[in-house]
Image (spheres, helix red, strand yellow):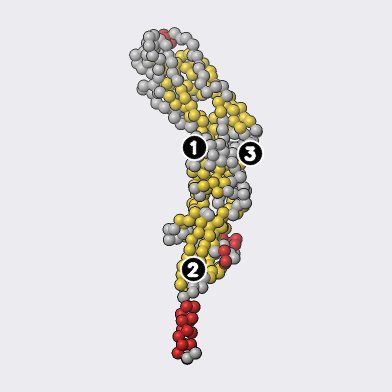
Amino acid sequence: MSLSRFLSRLLFLVLLGCGVAHAECYSLTGSSSDSALFMDIGRVIVDADAPTGSVLATRSWTLRNVSTSYRCSGSNQFDARVMMPGSQDAGNGVWSTNIPGIGLRFTLKNNVGMPLSYNGQMNLNSGSSTDVTMKNATFTLEVVKTALLSGSGQVAPGQYTTFGNTLSGTPLFTTWLRGNSLTIVSPSCRVSNTMNFHVDLGNVSFSEFKGPGSTTGGRDFSIKLQCPGGAGVAGTRVNLTFDGNLAENTTVAQGVLRNEQQGMNVATGIGVQVLDMKHQLIEFRKANPVAILNSEAMQFLNLSYFARYYQYLPKASAGVVQSHMVFSISYD
């Protein structure tokens, strides 16, 4: 073999070797504990009417205190993985929890604006050494309703996600839930004295009305609720919101319903006012607290109210009065 041919082969091998990128990532600072974010949200109330797939709560954290960093060169892959044992992919980036009907969605957005869902991957290509840090990245947690019916209780504590280069040995970023970080409350009170009921105010003399704002007669009535309790819902406040066709010349704070009776022998200018058990005004279209749930397995609420006739027009006449009111239940 001639010297010239040997040198040409050697030159080819050297050039070929220079074309191979050397991939490397190693940890510069920090330990695994420095990479941890505790996702403290608190109580999340599940709206029973919220459709499946609804986001019940969202919280984002800017990662200013995560001190871990890498020094990388070449082409490196970074993995965002869900680590919680038993968590299953529920679709659309949502992962199941120990609470039936409740899932979590995790999103990481780095400081150049690239969103990354879990489980996901991103590649970093750098010809020379490049420092990689989580500083000013943003992590977002969404609590998602994954079924029509959901449970209550604390979402299991532990590590939920990790992000980093697996070859480095130290994750760049991890997320955790503590024992009280996230509690799901799915209250489900139901009306036990039928959904629709009538309150008969009886007959009164028209002469008892003295002008707009005058009242007479009245009857007590109650709304009975049956509410599952337990540790998961203890401390939850139950509210009732009243609504209906308000009478002319009145406000929501007065709680007066106009007469909706049709046909012959209809009273004019006379409606029905609804008060609480102490005969105090109830503001309509506003959530009125009525009870706080406890840890008992089942709680029965007997909520007392009072309804009476109310004159709301200057010119009124005797006849039949019929009004209707609706109410809704909410929780906080």
Q: Residue at x 53, y 66 (%)?
A: 69
For the residues labelled 1 and 3, the Cα–Cα distance comes to 23 Å
> Mark 3 near mark 2, Cβ–Cβ under 8 Å?
no
**Residue at the disc numbered 2:** 75
Q: Of label 1 and label 3, which has the lower sequence position?
A: 1
Q: Of label 2 and label 1, which has the lower sequence position?
A: 1
Please tell me how crowded label 1 is: few (under 14), some (14-19), or many (20+) other residues with Cα within 10 Å: some
Q: Residue 34 sits in which quadrant?
A: bottom right
Residue 70's spot in the image, x, y percent?
53, 67
**Residue at the disc numbered 3:** 231
- Nearer to the camera, 140 or 288: 140
Say what amino acid the circle numbered 2 marks.
Ser
* Res 80 seen here: yes
Q: Which of marks 3 and 2 is in front?
A: 2
**Residue at the disc numbered 1:** 50
> Mark 2 near mark 1, Cβ–Cβ under 8 Å?
no
